Amino acid sequence: MKKILLLTFPFLLLSIYLQAQETSPDSTWKIHGENTFLINQSTFSNWAAGGVNALSANLVLNYDFNYKKNKWSWDNKVIGAYGLTKQKDLGWRKNDDRILLNSLLGYQAAPKWLYTFFLNFNSQFSNGYNYKSDGTRGDLISGGLSPAYLSFGPGIAFKESDNFRFNLSPAAPRFVFVTNEDLATSYGIDEGKKSRFEFGASFDAYYRKNIMENIGIENILRLYSNYLEDPKNVDVDYTLNLFMKVNKFVSVNAGVQMIYDDNTILTKEKDGQTYDGKGLQVKQIFGAGFTYKF
């Protein structure tokens, strides 16, 4: 909970500042943001069907900074998210941890088409652990900036609006970093090193739509193919978010993220035995809470 509160304060100050900048009459920026605090709780007492008391809290900060002047545009999305969950006798555990920066600089080549240069960075704030079937904590499997992914490169984009765009870069370097050398081999990095270089093709797409009054969906898709090693094994990162507005400050949010990275080795468990292997990573978040938009 302390981490969530510490994370909230500076972003709230930033949102107030940006909102003031947006009101400037000669501003060429469109700035939007959402600060969402979600809470889930389940409590059971003498409940015949059984159940486990649980509490979770999630903070999601989602900001868009979009610039447009003449033929130049610059679209930026920043997401910071952190969540904790607690079940009876198991203590607090992390259930969400994201740092995401997408930046796309464009020059109009034709109506709705742009020459572009993109930059993408994504990582996490804190340590993550593998938990065994009996609830006990296992090995460290991730950490702050372990891993971290940085990719960039020139390309071409289609942009219908701020709510629908995609970008293709056929020549995109990507760096994979770990600050903890002990985790290197789990993310395709050679033992004793802290980084890995890749060069390939990158595709990014974003689509957001209101499907009915006060209900909207957001889709974020990222694909990457490494020319230097197994280019047919495409890395996939897809996120689907559902936003349901109750009133000005209360909302219900749900989301699912699916990742497949051929270089990421996961710790799995079967018949009480643990083993390492590749696989699809899936994360789901659902909660009701307070949202401040600007």
Image (cartoon, rainbow, N blue to C red):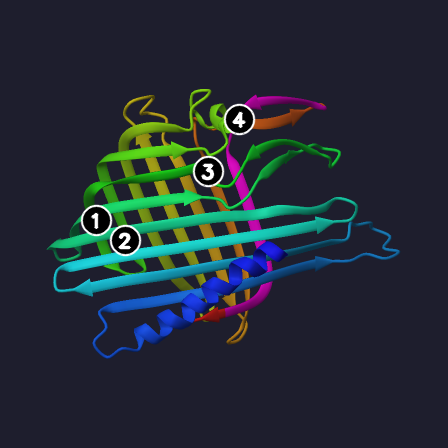
Between residues 91 and 167, which one lies in front from this camera angle?
Answer: 91
Q: Is residue 283 magenta?
A: yes
Residue 126: x %, y % from top left = 55, 44
In-image side of 230 versus 245 (left or right) = left
Residue where numbered disc 3 is placed = 259
Quick check: marks 1 and 3 in contact, CB under 8 Å?
A: no
Please report the bounds of the magenta region as a residue range.
272-291
The numbered mark, 2 or 4, whose residue comes first in the sequence reads 2
In-image side of 46 versus 37 (left or right) = right
Residue for point 56% across, 63% down: 37
**Mark sitting on residue 165:** 2
The residues tagged by marks 4 and 1 sit, at their Cα atoms, a distance apart of: 39 Å
Q: Residue 33 occupies which quadrant of the picture?
A: bottom left
Q: Is residue 169 magenta?
A: no
**Mark sitting on residue 182:** 4
Residue where numbered disc 1 is placed = 157
Between residues 271 and 37, which one lies in front from this camera angle?
Answer: 37
- Which amino acid is tagged 1? Ala
